[in-house]
Amino acid sequence: MIERALERHSTLLFGASTLLLVVIYLIVGGIYRPQNLDDGWTLSALYQYSVHGIEQDKIFGATLASEGQDGVFHFAKIQAFIYGAFLNVVGWTQSAGHAVSTLFVGLGALAWGIIAQRLTDRRRLAITTVILLLFSEPFFGPANQSRPEALTFFFASAAFALYLHDRPFLSGLSIGLAFEVHPAGLFAGLYVASAFFAKANKTGLRELLFSRPTARLLLGSLLGVSAYLLLHAEALSTLLETFSQSNAGISNFLIYYFFKAKYFRHIPELIFFVIMLAVFVRGRHWKDAQPLVWLLVVTGSSLLVLHRGSIHYVLYLYAPLMLISLWVADRYKKLYLTSALCLAFFIAQYGAVYYLNRSYSFDSYSAAVREAVPNDNLTVVGTSNDWFIFQERSFYAYTYGSAAFNAVAPSAFYLIRNDSPYASFPKDRFYENIDRTFRCSKLSAFALGGEKVQIDRCER
């Protein structure tokens, strides 16, 4: 009865969902992750390369010995070109970076709508997939950060959609572009491989392997790889070390997302996916949806080799899981009810985010810090996002290790001590090193939006 009522008002449901989605992105986006470490980290690297032609990171100490990619030395020059084309016009601000990321996350989600339509031939399922993906945190997060995931996921999704629509050359090229932006772009290859095996299951592996479409796919991939080689020729000698560093750890991203997130807030999603997959298997639906089975198996194989506990990679598997789950719901004529329940869950979470972070304003924080720090040529040392305030000045972030910072630190600088309740900066040991190595005197202090900030002048 509920399903029929929702179906009768499906147009209204889709319209209201879209409007609410826009409102949430506008209101919650700016306070979703206050003082997020990655915004300043990523955009500073793109800025240094786009504006000054500097490839390696000199601001955050993110060399291969740490957990960074060393600016754009190994990856992300294409991201610098694309983001730079926009940000060089409107300004290298945090909100502008988020706007570009939101654009590419949206395009990636639309690509999955095209993918869903192609794999299932169900228009309402395709539309629902796009809406729920954009409501989900694995998509909302990258849209409101300036990390590489937004652009990488777009290229990966485009590669998949292009292959399904018989554009193998462009698909292969997109695989190479996705990898250049970030190593996780290899998921583009997994997406396309799943479609390849699903097609081979019908036509025969040998026949497909030696076909013209496969030759075009390989040619496009070769062109994409060539683009990487041209952009990063000097980085090839340390590329293997980069992969080794990226794959460090004992956990994978799904375990981190479902079991290590604050408040265990993603457990309901895990239960939802498990139930839907159980129904899929119990009903022997793999006979009716082999492309979806190949998609799940091939992309799921990444869990065997990628051992990095980072929630940022979840969206690459979240999209296939959501698509299969909605396929099951539609098969049992529960698509609208399932969608309504998912929307209620997502909306409740964003309501909680707004309540917890409603007093935070990065614009107010920036104005207060800019006024408190003397306007001279002295170097500034602060949080990741303090870079947005002082991008034209000499600046270092807390992410430096003690020895590395002591080696590059000037004889005098301003230190922004931020006791923030919103984020766990790697600051305590950094402060200890500063107080042990430098003489610091307090210039001013203020409290704003729950953050206690002190400005010091430090000298060797």
Image (cartoon, rainbow, N blue to C red):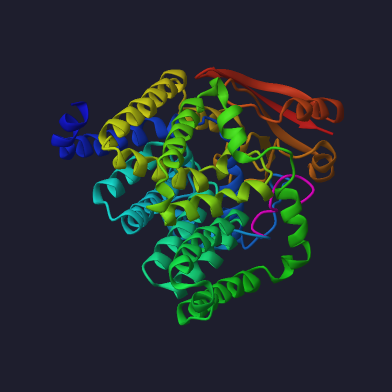
Above/below status of 229 relative to 61: below
Q: Nearer the viewer, residue 51 or 313?
A: 313
- Residue 362 or residue 331, whichever sits in front: 331
Q: Is residue 383 at least partly visible in the picture?
A: yes
- Picture coordinates of residue 425 (x, y %)? 66, 29
> Residue 451 at what x, y percent from top left?
56, 20
In the picture, measured across the screen, residue 228 lies left or right of residue 153, that is: right
In the rendered image, residue 83, in percent from the top left (x then y), is placed at 48, 56
Residue 86, quarter of the rendered image = bottom left
User: Residue shown at 60%/22% (left/top)?
Assistant: 420
- Quadrant in which the C terminus appears: top right
Seen from the viewer's position, the closer of residues 262 and 460 is 262
The residue positioned 38% from the left and 41% from the top of the image is 134
Q: Position of residue 388 (x, y in %)?
A: 55, 41
Q: Is residue 66 magenta?
A: yes
At 43% across and 57% down in the image, what residue appears?
291
Q: Is residue 176 above or below residue 392?
A: below
**Stretch in magenta:** 63-73
